[in-house]
Image: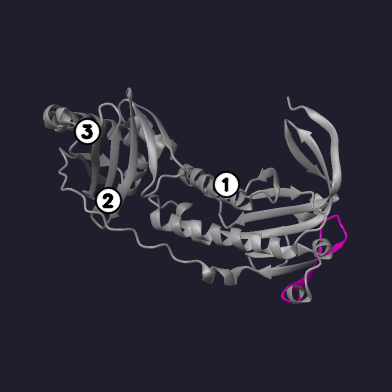
């Protein structure tokens, strides 16, 4: 049960709502999960870039409700903050588009995501629920109602009339805004001003192309026929929730910094009693199939090796899958002299076990949850 406290504070302040939109409703489980992961990354970015200027009251789906107790808002400073967040938001999406592995509906829609901001000032009443500050009052409702308006753009900063009155922007800044009036449901008509953010997209640099990597020649062992398309099998390899169900002795996968695996991302695996740090080096897709490269560093014994997955279309329903490895020389002579000569044989055996498990999981369990 939550512990409710009486009203703790009621004062003049600023309500700030960045709101993400653009995702449609998806049917497949993977797309729903990925849309949630992508939004989570973006929400975390918005909170980080907002810094100490505002406190978080709550996260409301694709939006964040921020507030502060500043009675005299700085128009230029807060406008600049919105523009900075906007640029960081779209820069993040550009890098995601460059490095993404998955091409589900959610991941392919990231370029369509948009961001708008609501800035409103008024009386904020705070009370505590379960150790978190919640907001009450008509002005909180006003700020939320402004999210639904008649502005025919998807990316902008909306300043309420009350915010403009309190921030007192210069005539130069005021003349750069477009004025409007909104009939807010259940409330009086409210004046607002807005500024389009679309032009700032031109200032966002394209991410540099990834450096081409020279991989050692890696041969796979015996390939196995699996009833699935290469893109489906790539999900089996890159989605932690799937991989942990078919890879032998894999106990845990923890992604670092990001919510969805992508090229050049890292994750930590607990495989049996060993801890490995794994980086996704590259994914090469063509008409024939997909080549997937990982590099793993094991702590005990200290090993550094590549894992190569080759997925080739056999026909419209069957994909042939093979796994190969390359072991890099160690700085320890005992590993080079004793372990490296026998590891290819050990891994070849383990790879065949994992291929059989991958086939069974993909053809049976995965089909049941689609």
Disc 2 packing (10 Å; few <14; some 14–19; many ≥20): some
Please report the residue visible at 74 percent of the width from the left and 27 percent of the height from the top: 2
Which badge, 2 or 3, is on the more N-terminal residue?
Answer: 2
| Residue beneath disc 2 | 290
Q: Nearer the viewer, mark 3 or mark 1?
A: 1
Q: Quadrant of the C terminus?
A: top left
Asked whether 130 falls inside the magenta stretch, the response is no
User: x, y (%) of residue 115?
Assistant: 61, 59
Which badge, 2 or 1, is on the more N-terminal residue?
Answer: 1
User: x, y (%) of residue 225?
Assistant: 22, 40
Q: Nearer the viewer, residue 204 or 262?
A: 204
Look at the numbered disc 3 and give the secondary structure of its residue: helix
Asked whether residue 200 is in view, the answer is: yes
| Residue beneath disc 3 | 351
Q: Quadrant of the N terminus?
A: top right
C-alpha separation, residue under disc 2 versus residue under disc 1: 32 Å
| Residue beneath disc 1 | 44
Asked whether residue 146 is in view, the answer is: no
Q: Is residue 153 depicted above or below 283 in this figure? A: below
Which badge, 3 or 1, is on the more N-terminal residue?
Answer: 1
Q: Is residue 55 depicted above or below 165 in this figure? A: above
C-alpha separation, residue under disc 3 versus residue under disc 1: 38 Å
Please report the residue visible at 85 percent of the width from the left and 55 percent of the height from the top: 186
Disc 3 packing (10 Å; few <14; some 14–19; many ≥20): many
Q: Is residue 14 depicted above or below 321 in this figure? A: below
């Amino acid at each position: 049960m939550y512990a409710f406290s009486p009203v703790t504070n009621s004062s003049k302040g600023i309500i700030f709502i960045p709101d993400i939109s653009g995702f449609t409703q998806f049917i497949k489980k993977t797309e729903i999960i990925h849309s949630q992961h992508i939004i989570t990354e973006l929400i975390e970015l918005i909170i980080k870039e907002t810094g100490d200027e505002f406190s978080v009251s709550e996260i409301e789906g694709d939006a964040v409700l921020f507030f502060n107790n500043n009675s005299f808002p700085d128009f230029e400073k807060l406008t600049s903050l919105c523009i900075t967040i906007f640029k960081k938001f779209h820069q993040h999406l550009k890098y995601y588009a460059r490095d993404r592995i998955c091409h589900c509906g959610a991941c392919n829609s990231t370029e369509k995501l948009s961001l708008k901001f609501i800035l409103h000032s008024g009386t904020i009443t705070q009370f505590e629920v379960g150790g978190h500050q919640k907001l009450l009052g008509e002005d909180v409702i006003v700020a939320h109602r402004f999210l639904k308006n008649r502005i025919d753009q998807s990316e902008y900063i909306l300043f309420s009339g009350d915010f403009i009155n309190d921030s007192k922007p210069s005539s130069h800044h005021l003349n750069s805004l477009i004025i409007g009036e909104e009939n807010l449901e259940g409330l009086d008509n409210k004046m607002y001003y807005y500024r389009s953010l679309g032009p700032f997209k031109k200032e966002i640099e394209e991410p540099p192309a990834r450096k081409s990597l020279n991989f050692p020649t890696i041969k796979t062992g015996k390939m196995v026929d699996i009833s699935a398309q290469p893109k489906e099998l790539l999900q089996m390899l890159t989605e932690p929730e799937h991989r942990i169900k078919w890879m032998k002795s894999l106990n845990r996968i923890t992604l670092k910094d990001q919510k969805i695996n992508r090229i050049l991302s890292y994750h930590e695996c607990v495989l049996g009693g060993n801890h490995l740090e794994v980086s996704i080096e590259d994914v090469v897709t063509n008409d024939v199939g997909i080549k997937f490269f990982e590099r793993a560093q094991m702590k005990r014994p200290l090993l550094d090796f590549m894992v190569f997955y080759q997925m080739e279309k056999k026909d419209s329903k069957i994909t042939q899958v093979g796994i190969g490895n390359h072991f890099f020389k160690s700085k320890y002579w005992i590993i080079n002299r004793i372990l490296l000569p026998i590891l290819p044989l050990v891994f070849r055996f383990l790879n065949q076990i994992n291929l059989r498990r991958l086939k069974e999981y993909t053809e049976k369990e995965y089909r049941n949850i689609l």
